[in-house]
Amino acid sequence: MKKLKLLAILLVIAMTLTSAVLGLNLLSFMTSDTEIIVSQRIVDINSPVVIKVPRINKYDRVYLILNATTIPYSITVNPKGVLIPLPLDVEGVEYDYAYPILMTRHFFFIANASGSAQIILNMQPKTPYAIKDVEGKTHVKVFEYVEGAKEYIGIDTEAVKFAENGYTQTVLVTPLNEVIQPDFQVSGEVKLLQGKVSYINLIIMTDTDWYAFNIVPSTVQPNITISFNVNAGSRELLGRTGEFLNKRGLFIALGIGLYSGQFNVSEAARAVVAVGDLTITNGGRSRVIRARVFNVYEMTYHLYIFRKFQPTFQHFLLVSALALEVLAFNYVTIKFWKRVKRGDGYIAQAF
Amino acid sequence: MHSLKHRKKLLFKLLKLTVRQMLALIIYNIMLIIAFLTLHSKHSPLVWLFDDKYVMNTGLTYYVDFRPGYPPLGKLPYTLLYRLFNNAESIMLFHLIVLNIILILLYKLLKGITTSRRAFIITCIVAAHYPMIWVTMFNPHADLLALIWLILSLYFIISSNPVGAGFSCGLGLLTKIYGALLLVPAFMLFKGWERVVLVSTFLTVVFLASLPFIALDPIMYLSVYVQHFFRGPSESIFALLDGYFLHTGFLHPTYEATIYFHQFLYIYTPSNIDHFRYSWSYPQLRYISSGLQMFFFLLFSIMSSRTHHSTQTALKMVSLAMISYFTFSAFWNPIVSIPFFIFLALATLDIKLSYQVLILVGFTIVDTLHIRIWFPGLPLGIHLGLLTVVVARAILISILLSVVKA
């Protein structure tokens, strides 16, 4: 019994020491496993933006967040294949429209080799709206459109891949971040310049729901200006009226939908839409989102380099030692317990 | 404690059934299969396995390159089914087997401490508990499997078997984290070297089963567990008091699971709409929630150690400890109500059967409503719906406590 007790004590000491060394090694890795680079670039849409990724090890993760509203025309990595992009995927759906990342652009890579790399971006103009796909996949081009004295944001959207239901939906999102009051209203005007849309909806995104109001039907003809006003009395697509009142309104969006059934096989599934100024009134205050497009602008980016733990020989040795110690300790304690209890007919029921 | 009638039965005997019980179980299974075949085209459980789809498409390895939401035993069976069959039927079949084991174990556990009639009625109520049926058919999450280890842990605790209890609690942790909680009341109930055996068996099971992941990337593996302690509230009274009306996971890109949890914290500013990077509007609520959880959990755990010679009272105290943990948790969802419901059934064994049945049916109605508010068609809406179920549940728990006290 004494020998067993001594062995158990020795094993506890060994386990404590091994875990401590293992823990300290991991802690020392964790304290320096993230590198964050925050910088700014002046973007001119006519020349590429180069972002340097310094000192990466194989399997490190590289995360780039662009404070940009439109998706770049193209993104390439130099040298080719050093950074492998991971798919954008939000709970099984291939779009990055989750609320926390709605207003920015994200690129995630896993390093396929050690060294350094460059990410080369060909940027699009900036708009007051973040433009994202929420159904299907589209190719969106942003341009400036002026008619008379009025400025518009031109959106040229072409379906690349329709969702299973046959639709694509591209949203133009702007933050709201206010509790929606009874006087809430959104007004503005849109115009179909070319092609066909299935719908244009005004969407109110709250912390629990989306409320979509149809402002342009599928029957709309090009070059007709449509003015809209959505308020507490408006009926949305699911028949709800004013349900968003007193909820936290997070974003206001314009959703442009294309439907595969509207286009012939030989025809490009495309629509060109002009979006005018948008006026949002809430709680007695109004603000106007001007329809402006910037070809030269300042862009902030965050580059995160997340180091990936690579097991060393010492690490394997420590883990193996700990496994043996834990196993031996368990064996000793069960043996000791059985000896302590022996004779009272109790142990027979244990394993 | 030691006078438990059936403590001589070994584990394999737990699953033995009479012909009548077998028949009842077969009829129950057939009913569930028919319901599943009728409804599964509308609600496929496969949509929940988006992370399996992601790691399969990208060639990443769970727990080494990617941290899923559940420990290995709670996640990998689904991954295996997804890779082998990729259909809803295989998941339903797996769940059905697990559910059968749960019901048999529960019945045997109950039969050891109460009358056969009562054991049968309570098992039937648990079998008819709507969230249990819903999870079995449509929700491939670890909670169902975790119930097996919870019930086994209880069985071993009241059988004074620290090896079995440590083993089950270890497997419980490897399935769903709350499975390890029973270690605390077990520790209180056991004495001397039993406690050492309990803890060492628990550690051995957890460590050995985790060995490949600890060897390859311990930080990623630990992230799987640690992330749960930093999540925001949801669907509880604390969530509603804080103004959070969403569910247990605000949408985030799946690629974020390829970095460690502490690295993940760098990429988001805390916000009161982001469950995974939550900023409390009233931070004191989280401390009140944790404080109440700890206080009552420890109180009932300690009380369980003072219940000499009464298995039923010990079980009641252990169950009340677990009920306290769930009740005061800032985090609730309809799936959590499943283990809660089992502990509720075990905590109310000493009251009049009709009262017990009424309490259980009351909770079933509230839990059913809770699930329904997330689907369109109910006029309540999410705000009013959540408020209704949270208040109704609080009233039922108050009734439960007054009845149990009496």
Image (tube, coloured by chain):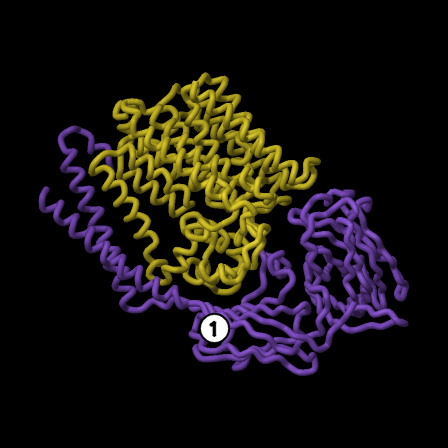
Residue at x 73%, y 57% (from the top left corner): A253
In the rendered image, the residue lying farthest to the front is A284
Vertical order, B369 against B45 (above or below):
above
Amino acid type, callout 1: Ala
Q: Quadrant of the C terminus of chain A?
A: top left
Q: Say which element carries label 1.
A: strand
Q: Which chain is yellow?
A: B
Question: In x, y percent, where is residue B25?
Answer: 47, 30
Q: Which residue is mark 1?
A: A111
Chain A is which colour?
purple
Q: State left or right for residue A64 relative to residue B307.
A: right
Eyeballing the image, is A22 above or below B114?
below
Q: Nearer the viewer, residue A85 or A351?
A: A85
Residue closer to the observer: B211 or B229: B229
- B35 left or right of B171? right
Where's residue B26, x and y in %? 49, 31
